[in-house]
Structures are given as structure tokens and as C-alpha cells.
Amino acid sequence: MSERGASWVDEALREHEEHTAAEHTAAVDQAAEHGAAEQGAAEHGTGGRPGSPSDREQQVLDRIDRARRRRPRIREERITMSHGAGGKATHTLIEAVFLDAFRNPLLEPLEDAAQLQVGGARLALTTDSYVVSPLFFPGGNIGDLAVNGTVNDLAVSGATPLYLSAGFVLEEGFPVADLTTIVASMTAAAAAAGVQVVTGDTKVVERGKADGCYINTAGVGVVEHDLAMGAATARPGDVVIVSGPVGDHGVTIMLARGELDIEADLTSDTAAMNGMIAGLLGAVPGVRAMRDATRGGVATILNEVAVAAGVGVVVKEDQIPVRAQVRGAAELLGIDPMYVASEGRMVAIVDGEQADRAMAALRAHPLGEQAAVIGHITADSPGIVLLKTAFGGTRIVDLLVGDPLPRIC
């Protein structure tokens, strides 16, 4: 174990002995915010069977797991930008306010779409709101982003997307020409995805009360297979697959704002993935779960899977596809590409015995040509995501703290 890793473990264990249960959660959050969590459990194999945590490391992992499983409670008195970043603050807000108030069996899985039984049909229902800034960016705009995002939420839930709604909140003074361009992009994206916008709403607010244009969409699809998918179904032996290079959208949005003196040949990866996903489901009955890697990126999805299924997730850094331009810009920005949003990429958990079949199905589609197996599900360290670094060490990949990339979708 490295000296830095050992000191992190010792510090965590001292905190474990000295603080009360309520202070534990704050200590874990603070450690993650200052990068201590990224030092992780350091190198494995220091004791016990190869690849398993030492006793001291296991105590730290157990402590983090206990902190995560405590009843969520919002400590802030007012909403902050972190509550919309897809990380720890977002999860706490959803579970402590919305899930607690609306709790029911259809909502509790917290998947990208709810599964509904209507008559003899099995339907999926999802909704999303889009507040991206800027409204127009390389590779797309808020309009096609809204359509593609909603289509993808239905598709990763195993549904065939059919119908969308579109609600607009427009600011007084917003150019009609810009609105026309946005709507035209939505029309083209819907046609490409094979869906229809069948209902909607428009509201106008006073100048200065919005940021030009916000869009809310809802989507309905039909589930035509018998697979029971979801993050909670992951099991040891499954593999973790990403459908292509990650982080393109988030970094593109940051550079498009023009606030940073960084130039890169990047465009958003926004795209509807329902065609690619239909091919995967048709070829591979062992798909356990799928998520589109939007807010919070791949790291957030893997943490959600680990907690929901009570399993460990191990991924290898050098197997995660990241474009050189994205990696370089992310390093300059001081962010990890694993936390950066994509809008045309998904993470799939697949039966390990069907990994080759899944890779072939994904790579047969243009959006999946660079798909990669990045890790696997394990029974060790339940609830924890571990990253095998390119330097041979291991670190914990926790949920995102703060909001390094605000308003990216």
C-alpha cells in the first residue's frame, strides 16, 4: 500500500473511532470533496486472498457503506447548484424530499423511466427538463438534446420510444428565429428516432426571469420483451460496458461557453440510441441494466448500480474510452472524465458469459463502434466502485461532490 493510501486509511479509521454516527456522513463527504476518496483503498493484495481488501481497508469500506445507507437528510437550507449536478447532493435531494413524499413501488427503483401496466400493455414513462447553456453548441442545440435525451431514457429502460410531449418556457424578448431553429432541430431529431411530438405547452415569463428558453419533455414507449432489467439486478460475474467514448458532451458545453481560453476540435455526442439498444436487446438476453451516462457521468451510474444491487464494481482506467481532446481539456479543467456527461453514450451491465455477443451487437451500429468492456461486477466490497488506475494502484470512485459542470443539459 502506498504511503498516501496508508495515511488515508489511518485517518479514516481514527475518525471512525472518534466521531458519532451523525458525524460519520459529514466526514465521508468532506474526504471525498478534498480528493481523499480518490486515494481510495490504495493497492489490494496486501493481505488475505489476492485482490481482496485488507482488514483495515475493509473497515473503511464498511464505514462508507454505512454512511451511504443512513436515511438521507438535506443539510443545506437553500437549493444550490450542486443539487442539480447528478452527484451526492442530487441523490440526497431526490431521496429526502421527492422520494420520501411520493414513495410508491413504481417510483422507488429510480430508473430512467417508470414501468407501467396499462390493460395488457407494458409501458414506460419518463420526463426530463433541459436548461443547457449555451442553447446552441457544436453538434446540436437544446432542441435535439431534449428529444434525444428523452428517447434515450426510454430506450435504456428497455422500451421502444413512441410519443413525446414538449413544454416550452420562453423569456420575453427571445428571438423568434432562434425558437424556429430549435423547433426544427426537434422535428429532425424526432424523425430520426422514429417518434412523434403529440402534445405540448408554452409559457412566457418576464424579461430576466429565465435564460431564453427552457424545454420540458415527457416520453411514452412500449416494452415488448420479458426482461426484468434494472440496476438492482446486477450480479457478480457480469461485465460493465460503455457504448463509446465518454465525456464529449460535457466538455463541449464547457468550451462553448467561451469562458476558458481552451480550443479543441470537439462536438457534442447527442444522439438517439434506441436503434443501437434495440439491436443489443434483440441479440443478448443477458442484459441486466442500462443507463445513459448524462449528469454525473459513468461514475454516478456505477455507484447507483453498486448500491442498488449490493455488489462491488471494479473498472480499469486504461479500458475506459476517452477522446484525447476530452482527456486533455478535462485535465486543464481539473475534472475526471468519468464524471463528465455524455448525451449519446450508455453504460450496460451484461451477463459475463454473453459479453462477446453484446460487444458484437453494439459494434454493429455506428453509435457503438467504439464500445468497450471497462470492468466487472464482484461480490467483494458491496456498494463500492473501485478503479484500477493506469499506474497499478486502486482508488475509490465515489459519487460526485459539488457541481464542476453546471447546466450541461
Image (cartoon, grey):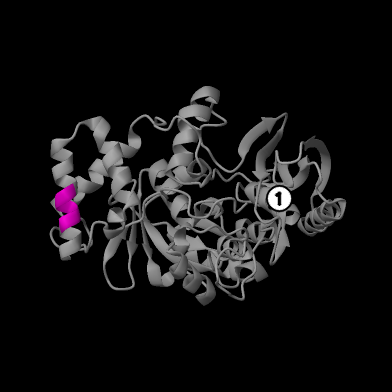
Q: Is residue 82 above or below residue 75?
A: below
Q: Nearer the viewer, residue 132 or 101?
A: 132
Q: Is residue 146 left or right of residue 245?
A: right
> Number of numbered discs present?
1
Q: Is residue 387 magenta?
A: no
Q: Nearer the viewer, residue 280 or 353?
A: 280
The extreme front residue here reads: 208
Circle 1 is placed at which residue position? 146
Residue 8 falls inside the magenta stretch: yes
Q: Compared with residue 303, is residue 185 higher up or lower down, i.e. above or below?
A: below
Percent position (x, y) of residue 347? 52, 57
How far across and down, in percent of the image, does residue 164 sit?
A: 77, 43
Residue 123: image quadrant is top right
User: In this image, 364 relative to 217: left or right?
Assistant: left
Name the outermost residue toward the top: 101
9 or 134: nearer the eye? 134
- Can you tell which quarter of the image residue 68 is in? top left
Q: Secondary structure at mark 1?
A: helix
Q: Position of residue 142 (x, y in %)?
A: 72, 53
Q: Position of residue 101 (x, y in %)?
A: 52, 23
The residues colored magenta run 7-11
Which residue is found at the position 44% from the left and 48% from the top?
402
- Residue at image x 44%, y 55%? 299
Could one spot residue 189 in this view of the protein? yes
Which amino acid is tagged 1? Ala
Q: Residues within 10 Å of mark 1 (few under 14, many from 20)?
A: many
Res. 45 visible in picture: no
Task: Report the quarter where the N terminus lies.
Answer: bottom left
Please report the residue visible at 50 percent of the width from the left and 46 percent of the height from the top. 86
**Magenta stretch, overall SS:** helix
